[in-house]
Amino acid sequence: MLRTMMKRKLLVFILSLMIILVPFAVYAADGPTPESNAVAINTVWTLVAAFLVFIMHAGFTCVEAGFTQSKNTVNIIMKNFMTVCIGVVVYYLIGFALMFGPDIAGFIGSKGFALTQRELFDFGIPLDAFWFFQAVFAATCATIVSGAMAERTKFNAYLLFCIFICAVTYPIIGHWIWGGGWLQKLGFIDFAGSTVVHAVGGMSALIGAWMVGARVGKYSPDGKVHAIPGHSIPLGALGVLLLWFGWFGFNPGSTLAGTNPAIASIAVTTMLAGAAATITSMLFSWIRYGKPDVSLTLNGCLAGLVAITAGAAAVTANGALIIGGAAGILMIFAVEFFDRIAKIDDPVGAISVHGVCGSFGTIMVGLFAKEGGLLYGGGAALLGVQVLGVAAALAFAGIMGLVVFGALKATTGIRVTEEEEHNGLDIGEHGISAYAETSTAPAANIF
C-alpha cells in the first residue's frame, strides 16, 4: 500500500514537472534567437530613422516658408504636405518596383508594383519597413523642386510634376545606384543619396526654375538683381535645425541596421560636415559682403549635410570636415552664379544647396574614401566612376525635367498670372492667407 502511494506521488510529481517545463521547452524552440533579435533591432532602427526623415518635411516647409514672402506661405504649406502624400502613394504603386524590382539590363526594375510578389525581395528586414524608409526618401527628392519654383508656379502643375518624379525619374536613377543597376555594378558610392536624392532634385529644380521664369521684379531690364527678402528668418532657422535633426535618420539610418556599430561614425561625419559648412559659409559671407549673412549661413549648414551624405560611411571625420567646409563656400559661389550670371531665380537656394553640393559631395568620395579614394592610394578609378555617375544622373534628371515641364507648359501652363503673383499665391491659388491680418482679399467661401 505504501509502495503504491509512493508510485502515485512520483507520477504526480513527474506530470507536474512536465506541465511546468514543457512550455519553457516550446518557448526555447520557437522563441527569440540571436538572429531574430538582430532582425527586430534592425527593423526598429530603420523605422525610427524613417520617422526622423519624415520630420525633415516639416523642416523643408519651414525653410521654404521663411525664405519666401508671407503672401505665399499657404501655398508652400500645401505643396509640402501634398508632396509627402502624393510621393508615398505613387512610390508605393509604381516607383518602388522600378527602383528595387528585378533588374532589366541594369537600367530599371520590373516587378513588385504595390508591394506585390514579396518573395522577390530580401533586404534583411521586413519589406514593409524597408519600403517605408525608401518612401520618405522619394518624397524628399520631390520637395527640393518646390522651393526653387516658389512664389510663381501653378499648384496643379507642381502636383503633376511631383507624380512624375516620384514615379519615374527618382526610381530609375535610384535603381542604377541602389537597386542593382549599372552604376552600382561599377562600384559607384552614394551611401545615403547626395546624388540619388539631392542632385537629382536639384537638377529638376534647375530645369523647373529656368522654365517657369524669374519672379516679377527680381531682375530689372538692365539685368540688375533685386533682392526679394523672405518674411521670417526665425522660421527658416527652425527649418534648418529640423532638417539637421532629421539628417541623423537620413544618414545613419541608411545602414538599415541598428546592430551595425558604423552608425556612430556616420553620425559623427554628418555632424562635423554640417558644422564645418556652417562655419565656413558664415566666415566667407562675412569676408565677401562685410557682414555675416544669416540666410547663407543657414543654407551653408544644409550644403555641408547634403555634401557628406554620399560619403558619410566611407570617409573619416577629418574628411568630413574638409568636404563640409568646402561645400559651405562652394554654395555661396553657386548662389551668386545662378542669381547674377545665369539669371535663374531660386528663392531658397535649392539648386545650389542640393544640386551643386550634392554633386560635389558625391565626387569628393572619389578623393576621400578610406577604401579606394585617390588621396588614400586607391588611384583614379573610383574618382572616375563617381564623376561618371553624377554626370549620368544629372543628364537623365535634366532630360526628364525638360520633357515634363515642357509638356506642362504646353498644356496646363506652369506659371500663375502676374496679378495672382502680385496678390500672392495664398489668395490666388487657395483663397486664404496664412496671416489673416495681412490679407488684402476676402477668403474664398468654401461652404
Image (tube, grey):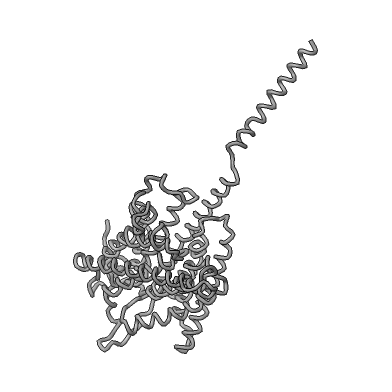
Can I make out residue 58 in this image?
A: no
Q: Residue at x 25, y 87 (%)?
A: 221
User: Can residue 441 be seen here?
Assistant: yes
**Quadrant into which the N terminus falls:** top right
Q: Position of residue 364 (x, y in %)?
A: 47, 74
Specify whether 239 is left or right of 10: left
Image location (x, y in percent) of residue 151: 31, 72
**On the picture, is 1 further left or further right than 40?**
right
Residue 304 position, x and y percent, is 48, 73
**Residue occupying the point 60% across, 33% down:** 26
- Considering every residue shown, the one lying at the far left of the view is 411
**Quadrant into which the C terminus falls:** bottom left
Residue in view at x 55 percent, y 69 percent: 370
Q: Nearer the viewer, residue 328 or 170?
A: 170
Q: Position of residue 160 (x, y in %)?
A: 28, 61
Image check: 156 left or right of 350?
left
Tally the marks.
Answer: 0
Q: Is residue 25 above or below residue 356?
A: above
The residue sitting at the top extreme is: 1
Residue 117, above or below 348: above
- Residue 137 appears in which quarter of the rendering? bottom left
- In-front residue for pair 308/230: 308
For the residue pair 26 and 271, the one nearer the viewer reads as: 26
Q: Is residue 241 above or below residue 96?
A: below
